[in-house]
Amino acid sequence: MDKAVLMGTEMNSSGGKRSLVHWRPNATINGHGLIIGASGTGKTYRLKATASALAYEYGARVIIIDPHGDISTEGEQRAHFNETSPYGLNPLKVNPDPVSGGVNRAVRNFLATINRSSHRLGARQEAAMRRLVEDIYAKNGFDASDPRTWNPMTNPDVRGRSRSQHVYPNVSDLKHYALFKYKQLMTGAGGPAFKALTELNRTIKTLNKQVLREHGDISEKAAIDHISDADSDKLEKLKLKAIESYQEYVTATKTGDEINDLLRYTDIKTLESLVDRIDHLEKAGIFKDSPPVFSGDVGVHVYDIHALGRDEQKMFVDVLLEDLWNEQKAKGPVPAPNTFIIMDEASIFVDKDSDHIINILVREARKFGLGIIFASQSINHFSEDVLANVGVKLILGVDQLFVGEMARKLRVDARRIDSIRPRQSALIQTKVIGDQKSDYVDIFLSR
């Protein structure tokens, strides 16, 4: 018989005997689940019970994402993430798979993760951030067009810190590089020259507009010939300053990349804002080279992120899910779920973008044995795709305000939802492989 997780007992008896109700992940359409329970309905207790059962009865690895720090189980291994954590995650880690991974995908994922926070990057910021990340990969020997370079352990062209420590570039590396480019623009070769040229162009435009206002019959190109002697002297000084600055710039050329750098990084204010943004990411203390080490392939592994701000939590979860997904795919297809991610307060992390990692997991993770269990106080946060593609749904009770809407979405009689007794009863639906219709069952919850 397939390994099962006891969920409760049927309310309606058959022949005077109530049947036990189990969730058999091996037999359902996937290992995904949805647990809905308003405050006071016992959702946290149910998450603990489900995690323990999956780990110690079903025999799976259970990963709990704990945004409140209140989901604890016997025998768990817990990693706390905060500013002083000795471990972290690296959002610049590259999936070395030549089909589904690569440097360009890592760049896109990093930008998308940042833009899911409450402070989206502006168009210029995003373009500049993309250049910074592309450059930090290139400077460490990661070639976006060559899959052989996507693993620091085997990269034939590896350079910099990636060579000495066999790691991917991280947020600290990105911060140092962004700060270097900012200082270079402000004080180094290329910076003064560009600043002098900008000042010259701005002055010429101002003087031209002034002449055109005074002489309406003069063309814009000819306006420069009608400025005053004093203004002409001013322009000559600005031109001389620009020429001298560019002469110094040319003399200081050492790497051969100076002209490309000048063209790629010209907006000092934008670069300054990105230095501040990256500095904030680094100071969160959660983006580092070394992840926490959990022992064993079976058990409960808790990622405690309650000390993080909301934006940091969202970014952390995006990076963690990408890592777990790549890890499962690298192991290859399996016949049944062997790893479950329990995500409390899932409404914080879900996203409507079809390319977001959560939606990818819902669609594709079954083949690689990965299940994700969403827990939330309301069903409104989940798309129809999620609602239609989870193997089990457990309804622990909702506020009266949402009963009607939930009944419509789940296609169940509202009276059944209204009659749920918190911490005692629930509605459950399990979608068994091969069944055309899966009805909801009223149950007394197991203890």
Image (tube, rainbow, N blue to C red):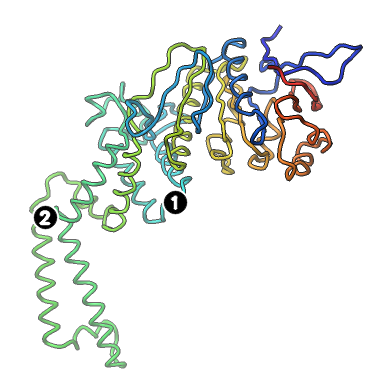
Choose between 216 and 319: the one closer to the eye: 319
Q: What element does badge 2 sit on?
A: helix
- Image coordinates of residue 72 in percent, x first then y, are 52, 21
Residue placed under numbered mark 1 in the picture? 120
410 vs 102, left or right, is right
The quadrant of the picture occupied by the C terminus is: top right
The residue lying at 63 percent from left, 29 percent from top is 43
Quadrant of the rendered image containing residue 403: top right
Q: Nearer the viewer, mark 1 or mark 2?
A: 1
> In the drawing, does residue 180 fall left or right of residue 129?
left
Tell which of 84 and 322 is nearer to you: 84
Residue 250 numbered tag? 2
Q: Indicate the position of residue 424 as horizontal and vertical percent values.
A: 73, 24
Task: Answer few, some or many: residues within 10 Å of disc 2's Cα (few below 14, many 20 plus, some between 14 and 19).
Answer: some
Q: What count of labels does the image hold?
A: 2
Tell me the amino acid under the disc marked 2: Val
For the point 41% across and 27% down, which residue is it? 80
The first of marks 1 and 2 along the sequence is 1
For the N terminus, the quadrant is top right
User: At x 18% / y 51%, what residue is drawn?
Assistant: 184
Q: In the displayed structure, does residue 214 sit left or right of residue 75?
A: left
Mark 1 neighbour class, 10 Å CA radius: few under 14, some 14 to 19, many 20 or more: some
Real-space CA distance between mark 1 and mark 2, rounded to the nearest whole angstrom = 37 Å
Q: Nearer the viewer, residue 365 or 119?
A: 119
Instruction: Identify the amino acid type marked 1.
Output: Arg
